[in-house]
Image: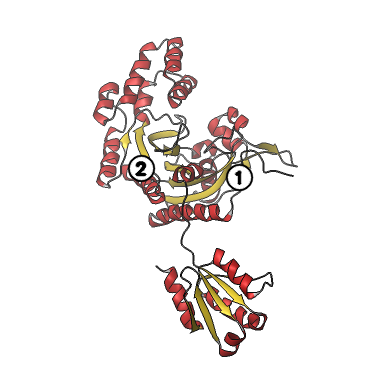
Amino acid sequence: MLQKPRGTRDFLPDEMEARRTVEWKLREVARRFGYREVCTPAFEDLELFTQRSGEGITNEMYVFEDKGGRKLALRPEITAAVIRMYINEAKVAPKPLRWCYFADCFRYERPQKGRYRQFWQFGVELIGADTAIADAEVIMIAAEMLNATGVTYDLKVGHLSFMKQLLRDLEPAAQRRVMAHLDKKDFDGLGQTLAEMGKPDLAQSLTNLISCRTLAEALEIVGAVPGEERITQTLGILDAAGVRYSLNFGIARGLDYYTGMVFEGFAQNLGAENQILGGGAYRLAHLFGGDDVASCGFAIGFDRVMVSLGNVPPKKDTVLAIVCTNEGRRRALDVARAFRETGIRTEMDLMERGLGAQLAHASKTADYAVVIGKREAESGEVTLKNLHTGEQKTLDLAAAVAEVKAYGAR
């Protein structure tokens, strides 16, 4: 018997309805802030991702050659593809561009709880705005989205100016080694690496910076940093908007393209793999042959959000079952159409079962049953049965539709 590929999942209807419920909440927040959905191909030129992250990322990706010999990859994330699309399709569009997306990504890594080879991201990209309020808006949306899902989380906000100031004398390759230690919270490795580089004192400065929880503390350790006024403005906007966050100047996102404000979200009830959101201000378009446009965005790890939420009740959906005899079947088709036209989910028996068997099945799957026998077919009325209470009444079709609609609106 064939099995699904390792690191992938099958979603049955109940789980899909729960996922769509949470997805809808994210889409609604994006809509209210004016962000419109975009979509990019599931595979791109391999170079799109190696230019940003280096050749080493190919070990974590699904890479292949097509029949024309072109090197392609299933997308491991979507930001790079969105910026590529901006350069190809929307470079002259009025700024700023407020875009969002929801799509699956693919990474070849060891599957574990909350980490899969096929996974979904909901993301936001703000392109072409380079101000404090632009940075703040993106963080505000991130917080609103996590609030909307109901997940319990901690939001950490930082700024790379402090880290860059401390690492300014290191070569880019050395900076990446240091950042890798910080990202993994490997402080022993950090001390050893900096000692090998002849910078042992830097380890203590970095450790002190990571422990800072106020802007004043960070400035005391590092001194003046570029964009200090903008940082103050951004944090002031977040405070005025009531965003719940804490400062963390140890957030170690890529120094190659992240330029300033960075932020991450962590679910409180997950284990080691508890990061559910990451983003910041960045400049990426110039790497792909575009203009040096300022951007700010984030991606939510949708699957980890769902793991954190546990059982999510799907949106309430009233289900109506049409139960009919052979004499009432033609009339049943018209009745089903009338209910469906008002948005009520309506199912008919397809197994040619008897009336009793149809009602027994309906009681397991539906909220109401509309019974149509010979008498109802002749009179034009229907018998409406509430399958939760057992109450049954004979009504004209319009009244039956109204009652079921009213039940669904509760």
Q: 219 and 28: which one is in front?
A: 28
Disc 1 element: loop
Question: Would you say residue 403 is visible in this rendering?
Answer: yes
Residue 250: x %, y % from top left: 37, 27
Using the numbered discs, state the Cα–Cα distance from disc 1 to disc 2 in whole angstroms.
35 Å
Q: Are marks 1 and 2 in contact (CB under 8 Å)?
A: no
Other residues around mark 2 within 10 Å, as few (<14) / some (14–19) / many (≥20): many
Residue 191: x %, y % from top left: 42, 14
Q: Amino acid at mark 2?
A: Asp
Residue sitting at x 43%, y 34%: 258
Residue 189 vertical placement versus 78 (above, below): above
- Looking at the rendered image, the disc whose residue lies closer to the viewer, 1 or 2, is 1
Which comes sooner in the sequence, label 1 or label 2?
Answer: 1
Of the 4 image quadrants, the one containing the C terminus is: bottom left
Find residue 279 and report its image quarter: top left
Residue 49: x %, y % from top left: 57, 36
Residue sitting at x 54%, y 55%: 14
Question: Would you say residue 96 is visible in this rendering?
Answer: no
Of the 4 image quadrants, the one containing the N terminus is: top right
Disc 2 element: helix
Residue 371: x %, y % from top left: 57, 78
Residue 135 circle label: 2
Residue 9 circle label: 1
Q: In this figure, what is the number of numbered marks? A: 2
Taking the image as shown, residue 401 lies to the left or right of residue 55, namely left
Residue 399 vertical placement versus 226 (above, below): below
Q: Amino acid at mark 1?
A: Arg
Residue 207 circle label: none
